[in-house]
Amino acid sequence: MSPESIAADLPLEDRARLLTGADFWTTAAVPGVPSIVLTDGPHGVRRQMGASDHLGLHAAAPATCFPPAVAMGASWNRSSRDASAARWRRRRGPSASPSCSARA
């Protein structure tokens, strides 16, 4: 089924539930659409465990964060950019291609 056909079959209340979410990090599940966890990029994946808040003050699951690509580009520091890209590849595998590893 396409997303359009699933949405067309949902009652208005379930469509609205898709826009509000189950909590700060998770979408609401509705018939035909499972709940999914969202993250807070742009520089890495971070998720608060248990109670969540919009400030990120509660404990979070372990995460590796990298500078956003815009910061890497603005630094004009190619060696720093390349080192960050190498760390990303070690963490994510050789096929990973972060935007911060692109040649300027």
Image (spheres, rainbow, N blue to C red):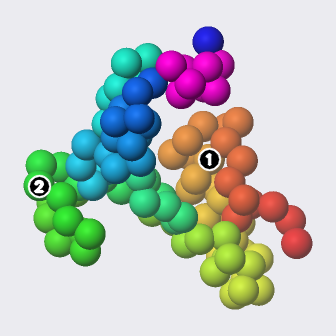
Quadrant in which residue 52 is drawn: bottom left
Q: Quadrant of the C terminus?
A: bottom right
Give me the residue at 68% from left, 77% from top. Answer: 70
Circle 1 sits on which residue? 89
Query: How many neighbours does mark 2 have within 10 angstroms: few (below 14), some (14-19), or many (20 or more)?
Result: few
Q: Residue at x 61, y 65 (%)?
A: 84
State the extent of the magenta-drawn residues as a range.
2-9
Visible residue check, residue 90: yes
Check disc 2 and give the amino acid type. Answer: Ala
Residue at the right extreme of this rendering: 104
Quick one: SS at disc 2? loop
Q: Is residue 69 above or below residue 63?
A: below
Question: Whole-percent x and y of residue 35?
Answer: 35, 31
In the image, what residue type sits under mark 1? Arg
**Which residue is label 2 attached to?**
51
Asked whether residue 63 is in view, the answer is: no
**In the displayed image of the protein, which residue is found farthest to the front?**
12
Residue 4 forms part of the magenta stretch = yes
Quick check: 50 left or right of 26?
left
Q: Is residue 17 above or below residue 66?
A: above
* Label number found at residue 20: none
Residue displayed at 35% across by 26% down: 30
Q: Does 6 sit above or below residue 47? A: above
Return the residue nearer the eye: 3 or 40: 3
